[in-house]
Image (cartoon, rainbow, N blue to C red):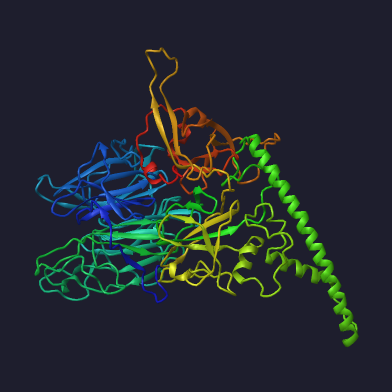
């Protein structure tokens, strides 16, 4: 992991300068959590407390207001907010001036459904009182509540503050709800009472610990406390490096093994007329939680008292300075990026103003995480339309291709893109066509072999004559005749006269006419040599750098001469750079077009200002053979709730159907005779009866065969479905669909139907009707080809 700086040590802050949608009004005292690429913002206030739930998509850069329902909580500020999977928990906060709450709410983000929870009180003490400025931290299936500020005034318009140092544990249920509060027994002297502090959890070296930093108790604090959750012992860890300034209303987030502390109220380094000694800061510090070493990335730079009245919060800071000083902002980590939004800027009483910002920033802390495997959208004779899942910390994507050297075995089924659908039956016309092509290939091989033998004999005669001549002039010279034969064979291959056994079955290029001879003048161009010999190597070639999530690949680029490993992102993934690659990096490079009926492997990697991330696992696809149909496209999967027909006295109960639709191949190349839909299953099914399959392969059974572009089947078919977990935190059911014309079956489209991980155990037997969910919203790309 990098330190979040460029080569000169300056932090890699980036301002999001363009976003769309329903933009929330500026505020402070709000909180934010992340669900994959989404940032959910709730609470806070600025001229009134907000009760709206706002969501920001970091990939599409769009704000939106989800249609929430259920027990919608009132707006609150200085609350506790945590996220576990796709559910969000909200506790406490200020609902009105001087009025605090201790209510607990749960939001099921998969359905945008609010629910008020009523966990039981602890057996060894009272339930948590109403409070603000506390910390709520998630560890496993428990939430830990510490500190905050309570109001002991009996007058609703009064305010008698009381700092809290109590510590609670909330045990959560597996899918929804909470069992109850407990007061854990801890050992050692713990932190003093405080509010507006920060608390994070980190698991390292076999132990999970809570870290509490800063806060407010009449003055700002700079102490760091840790609680070992295995032994429940409080301690103050020994640290090295420059300690951050005392602060409150700051943010702390863990990315990798580092805790990032940004902003908040800090003591002012100068004097401000008639004003207190506390101002907002934009300082940024990190604590390595493995080595316990502090590092200051951005020192405290400015005093808000120096600003002039009427200054604009969106005014541009100095270059590379990052966001302006603020407190009460929200922060959420998405991948390796730390996002900062809104917050207030501190004020001077003499100027009598305060401003809440409306800007959005992110800090680049590391290269993007490893990408997920490339998916196929459609296949044609000369083009493969591929797509990939977004990475939250990627600005663009590097797509590479590798030629597959080994052709399919003789007599195999027509090419299937991801893997040949098992059980696909060919028709007699297709079998006859394959036999005819095989006969032509064999005849061509014999003819070319005769030409090669004649050429070898002629060259052998010339070599012997040359040897005798050199032996007469310079003495005896011994040379290996096999060297000359192998060299001439390579020349013939590069000139197109001799077919490589590894490529003769799949080559779509026309063979030279009989009797033609290889040109003996200029050798073939470097680009042509690489195009023809790429399949003999394990080289990866760049397709390009894309800001989109798809590409219609019809060609790839050869590396510069003499530099076969060059890419626009550098040769190593650890290289950090500010300038992102682009199309200009491929100017002047030679191009190679995709060949018909050829298999290619694809991989993709994310790129950001810190450099290039790791490549995804390789996905193998194939272009169509001339005459075979393309892959079906626009596949959509949904669930349909079916009620029992009482009038017909049906015995079956209400159930769910899986309904799948698709569009015909864009290149049918004739009349489509039928479609076949396959489902990946857990049990291995092989033609030989063996229970073992090669690692990484999935077994499939056919669930539909017909001429319609839609099919439905009961969810009971999913009882034995294979759950693909190759993509992190995205379990899915895998389908494949292929089309057949007079020539046979073309390549198959593979679809991942993403499932809710909490409902997989009861996916087939549940009778509840699922509504549109966050999971479906996030993964429409997996359920459509």
| Residue found at the very far bottom of the displayed protein | 473
Q: Is residue 331 above or below residue 750?
A: below
Q: Is residue 335 above or below residue 156?
A: below
Depth order, front residue of 132/13: 13
Residue at 64 percent across and 37 percent down: it is: 429
Return the x and y of residue 406 as percentages of the image width and height: 67, 54
Q: Quadrant of residue 241?
A: bottom left
Q: Is residue 690 left or right of residue 41?
A: right
Return the x and y of residue 466 as percentages of the image width and height: 85, 79
Q: Is residue 381 left or right of residue 211?
A: right
Return the x and y of residue 558 as percentages of the image width and height: 56, 67
Asked if residue 213 shows in the view, the reply is no
Q: Is residue 304 left or right of residue 144?
A: left
Depth order, front residue of 685/545: 545
Tally of numbered discs: 0
Q: Quadrant of residue 329?
A: bottom left
Q: Is residue 548 above or below residue 435?
A: below
Depth order, front residue of 53/516: 516
Depth order, front residue of 497/139: 497
Asked if residue 248 shows in the view, the reply is yes
């Amino acid at each position: 992991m990098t330190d979040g700086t460029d080569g000169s040590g300056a932090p890699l802050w980036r301002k999001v300068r363009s976003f769309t949608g329903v933009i929330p009004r500026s505020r402070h005292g709000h909180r934010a959590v992340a669900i994959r690429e989404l940032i959910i913002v709730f609470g806070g206030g600025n001229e009134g407390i907000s009760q709206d739930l706002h969501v920001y998509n970091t990939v599409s850069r769009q704000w939106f207001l989800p249609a929430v329902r259920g027990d919608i909580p009132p707006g609150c500020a200085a609350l506790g907010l945590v996220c576990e999977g796709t559910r969000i928990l909200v506790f406490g906060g200020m609902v009105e001036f001087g009025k605090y709450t201790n209510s607990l709410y749960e939001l099921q983000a998969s359905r945008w459904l609010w629910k008020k929870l009523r966990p039981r009180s602890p057996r060894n003490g009272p339930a948590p009182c109403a409070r603000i400025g506390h910390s709520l931290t998630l560890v496993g299936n428990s939430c830990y509540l510490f500190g905050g500020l309570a109001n002991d005034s009996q007058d609703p318009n009064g305010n008698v503050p009381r700092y809290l140092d109590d510590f609670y544990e909330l045990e959560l249920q597996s899918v929804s709800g909470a069992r109850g509060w407990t007061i854990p027994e801890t050992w050692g002297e713990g932190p003093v009472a405080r509010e507006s502090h920060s608390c994070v959890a980190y698991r390292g070296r076999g132990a999970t610990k809570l870290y509490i930093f800063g806060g407010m108790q009449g003055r700002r604090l700079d102490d760091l406390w840790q609680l070992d959750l295995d032994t429940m012992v409080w301690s103050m860890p020994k640290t090295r490096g420059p300690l951050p300034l005392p602060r409150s209303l700051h943010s702390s987030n863990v990315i990798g093994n580092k805790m990032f502390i940004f902003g908040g109220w800090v003591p002012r380094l100068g004097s401000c007329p008639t004003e207190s000694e506390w101002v907002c800061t934009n300082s940024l510090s990190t604590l390595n939680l493995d080595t316990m070493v502090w590092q200051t990335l951005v020192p405290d730079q400015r005093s808000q008292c120096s600003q002039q009245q009427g200054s604009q919060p969106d005014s541009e800071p100095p270059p590379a300075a990052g966001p302006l000083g603020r407190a009460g902002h929200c922060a959420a980590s998405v991948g390796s990026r730390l996002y900062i939004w809104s917050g207030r800027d501190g004020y001077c009483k003499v100027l009598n103003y305060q401003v809440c910002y409306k800007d959005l920033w992110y800090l680049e802390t590391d290269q993007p995480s490893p990408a997920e495997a490339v998916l196929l959208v459609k296949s044609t004779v000369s083009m493969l339309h591929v797509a990939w899942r977004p990475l939250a910390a990627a600005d663009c994507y590097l797509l590479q291709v590798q030629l597959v050297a080994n052709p399919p075995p003789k007599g195999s089924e027509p090419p299937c893109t991801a893997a040949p659908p098992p059980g696909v039956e060919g028709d007699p016309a297709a079998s006859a066509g394959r036999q005819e092509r095989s006969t032509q290939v064999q005849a061509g091989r014999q003819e070319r072999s005769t030409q090669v033998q004649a050429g070898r004999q002629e060259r052998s005669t010339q070599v012997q004559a040359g040897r005798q001549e050199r032996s007469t002039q310079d003495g005896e010279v011994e040379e290996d005749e096999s060297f000359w034969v192998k060299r001439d064979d390579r020349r013939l291959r590069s000139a197109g006269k001799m077919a490589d056994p590894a490529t003769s079955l799949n080559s779509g290029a026309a063979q030279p006419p009989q009797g033609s001879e290889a040109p003996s003048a200029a050798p073939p161009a470097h680009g042509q040599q690489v195009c023809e010999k790429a399949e003999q190597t394990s080289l990866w070639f760049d397709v390009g750098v894309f800001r989109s999530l798809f590409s219609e690949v019809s060609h790839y680029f050869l590396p510069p001469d003499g530099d076969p490993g060059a890419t626009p992102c550098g040769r190593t993934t650890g290289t950090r750079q500010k300038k992102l690659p682009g199309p200009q990096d491929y100017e002047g490079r030679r191009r190679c077009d995709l060949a018909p009926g050829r298999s290619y492997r694809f991989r993709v990697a994310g790129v950001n200002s810190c450099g290039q991330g790791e490549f995804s696992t390789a996905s193998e696809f194939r272009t169509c053979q001339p005459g075979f149909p393309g892959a079906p496209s626009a596949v959509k999967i949904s669930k349909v709730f079916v009620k029992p027909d009482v009038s017909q006295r049906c015995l079956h109960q209400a159930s769910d159907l899986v309904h799948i639709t698709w569009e015909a191949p864009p290149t049918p190349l004739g009349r489509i005779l039928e479609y076949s839909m396959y489902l990946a299953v857990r049990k291995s099914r092989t033609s030989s009866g063996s229970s073992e399959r090669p690692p990484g392969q999935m077994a499939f059974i056919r669930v539909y065969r017909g001429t319609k572009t839609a099919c439905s089947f009961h969810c009971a078919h999913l009882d034995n479905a294979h759950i693909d977990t190759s993509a992190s935190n995205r379990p899915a059911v895998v389908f494949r669909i292929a089309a057949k014309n007079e020539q046979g079956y073309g390549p198959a489209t593979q679809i991942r139907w993403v499932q809710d991980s909490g409902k997989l155990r009861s996916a087939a037997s549940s009778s509840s009707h699922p509504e549109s969910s966050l999971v479906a919203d996030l993964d429409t790309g997996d359920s459509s080809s």
